[in-house]
Image (spheres, grey):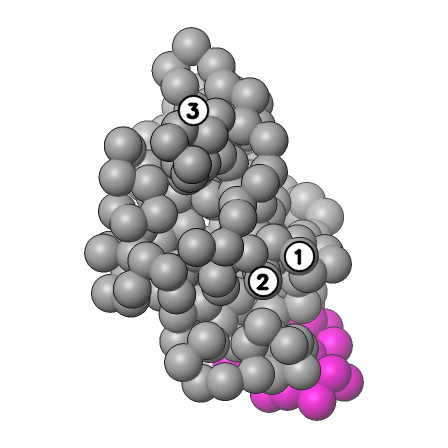
Amino acid sequence: MAALVDDDPRGPGQEPLEFGALATRFEVIREAADRSPDSLVPRSIMRGIAAGLSRAPGLRRTDPLKSHQQRSLWARLADEATARPEHVGFILLGDGGVRELAERLGVPHKTLATRLESWRRTRPRMVVTFTGRRVRGSTPLHAVQVPVASDLVLWAATTRAAVDEVDGRPPHPLLVADAAERLAMLGTTGPAFGTWPDLDDAVEDLGVAIARRGSEAPRRRLETGRHR
């Protein structure tokens, strides 16, 4: 089995300290907005992040993802990492470790371990793995983070927590989902937006950036009818 050797300092709840820090940031945003996690960052946005991660223009040119099978596995991992907004891009595992995650993803655990090792060696890292101390010759896998997903969940929460300067409401979740998908394809996050027209313009600009990288921007979930 490939070695998963990232550090795993853990907090009181046995989750990685990195998870605790990001989850706390999410909770601060959620409490300030006085919304539930699913209301603040609905499933449509989480699906947008997962879709963007699966369609990033550079995937076919990345050594660990040149084959269809590898890209399919990456897409399933992205789905797991975006299952809940309060998990902020982390997949938290029990005692089953890599075998537990492999069962969720429907692949042999040795295949998954090999893929995770490849993905954690990319620059920037596609995943970060958190393992415990070696026990009987193996290091148990406790968590996997997709850093871009973490960044975008927090970006979406911050964006959705803002009250639009135009109509006094938070940005429409489908508009945020459109932006999040494009940002995930580009492997980046965006600034906070004060009005939905600014965010709408940003979606169009992100589509242009994706085209410049030789890919096609996804279809929009929310057609606003605006023309610049």
Q: Earlier in the sequence, mark 3 or mark 1?
A: 3
- Are dots 1 and 2 in contact, CB under 8 Å? yes
Question: Residue drawn at (26%, 47%), measured in percent from left and top?
Answer: 100
The local secondary structure at tag 1 comes to loop
How many neighbours does mark 3 have within 10 angstroms: few (below 14), some (14-19), or many (20 or more)?
some
Question: Residue drawn at (40%, 19%), measured in percent from left and top?
Answer: 14
Q: Is residue 109 left or right of residue 160?
A: left
Q: Earlier in the sequence, mark 2 or mark 3?
A: 3
- Counting from the top left corner in percent of width and height, residue 164 is at 57, 44
- Counting from the top left corner in percent of width and height, residue 217 is at 58, 82
> Where is mark 1, residue-wise?
121
Quadrant in which residue 109 is drawn:
bottom left
Q: Which mark is residue 190?
A: none
> Where is mark 3, residue-wise?
15
The quadrant of the image that shows the C terminus is bottom right
Q: Which mark is residue 118?
A: 2
Mark 2 vs mark 3, foreground winner is 2
Along the line of sight, the residue nearer the viewer: 91 or 151: 91
Disc 1 residue type (three-letter): Arg
Residue 134 showing in the rendered view: yes
- Range of the magenta residues? 205-218
Is 192 drawn above or below residue 172 in the view shown? above
The local secondary structure at tag 2 comes to helix
Along the line of sight, the residue nearer the viewer: 25 or 17: 17
- Counting from the top left corner in percent of width and height, residue 222 is at 44, 70
Inter-mark Cα distance, 1 to 2 = 5 Å
